[in-house]
Image (cartoon, grey):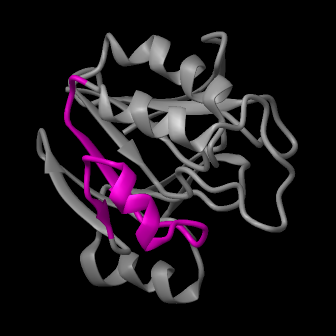
Amino acid sequence: MKIIVTSDTHGGLVGWKGVSEFLKEADLLLHAGDILYHGPRNPLPEGYNPKELAEAINSLELPALFARGNCDADIDQLLLRFPIQSPYIFCFLDGLSIIVLHELNQRTRDMIGLYKPDILVFGHTHKPDLSKEGKTLLLNPGSPSLPKDSEPTFAFIDTQGGSVCVLSLGGNVILQTKI
């Protein structure tokens, strides 16, 4: 299974279009929250257009799972045909257990010991990360719209090939590891 992972799109249509170029190759999209609204502490991302982003997301032809981020509100759900899961997504894909959430903090980090996921996807920091905590792979895809300390990024999980990578919107590998 080929899974595109993104987070922190914050209403940025330009960043979403960059990610959507790769969706043609995917079987599933996982989004770790902060979908439509830019939030009061963030600048407006390039191409800020939450309404058009919602329309682009609604036109997806593949399954998509969305975790709820700290900038997501009930009104956002009214614009999206996909449910915004709140606040965690638990999935089992090709023998891998994956948890998707927005913010990695002590409370959510405790889920690693409780559920022992193979992969824990998180966002919030807008910084790509691919590291291990015990046997759990921590994956932050960064942000395609409002990156911090990196270029715009997203991630790709290949369950058959057993690899995870963080990619720039141009397709360059930023971080990579085996599952």
Per the rendered image, the range of residues in magenta is: 61-85
Place of residue 19 in the rendered image (x, y in percent of width and height, measured from the top left): 53, 23
In the figure, is residue 158 to the left or right of 63?
right
In the rendered image, the vertical position of residue 31 relative to residue 101, given as above or below:
above
Residue 98 colored magenta? Answer: no
Instruction: Judge by depth and name the residue closer to the eye, 112 or 21.
Output: 21
State the image coordinates of residue 63 (x, y, percent, origin top left): 20, 35
The reply to whether residue 175 is in sight is: no
- Is 74 colored magenta in this rendering? yes
**Residue at image location 65% in from the left, 43% down from the top:** 142
Quadrant including the C terminus: top left
Q: Nearer the viewer, residue 79 or 113?
A: 79
Q: Residue 45 placed where, x, y %?
A: 78, 39
Which quadrant of the figure has residue 3?
Answer: top left
**Along the horizontal axis of the image, is 123 left or right of 61?**
right
Front residue (pair 14, 159)? 14
Q: Name the residue rendered at 25%, 76% in the picture.
A: 115
In the rendered image, is residue 28 in sight?
yes
Quarter location, residue 160: top left
Q: Residue at x 37, y 18 (%)?
A: 23
Please name the residue shown 56% across and 19% down the image.
Answer: 17
Q: In this picture, is 39 found above or below 82?
A: below
Q: Position of residue 16 (x, y in %)?
A: 56, 28
Q: Is residue 131 above or below residue 24?
A: below
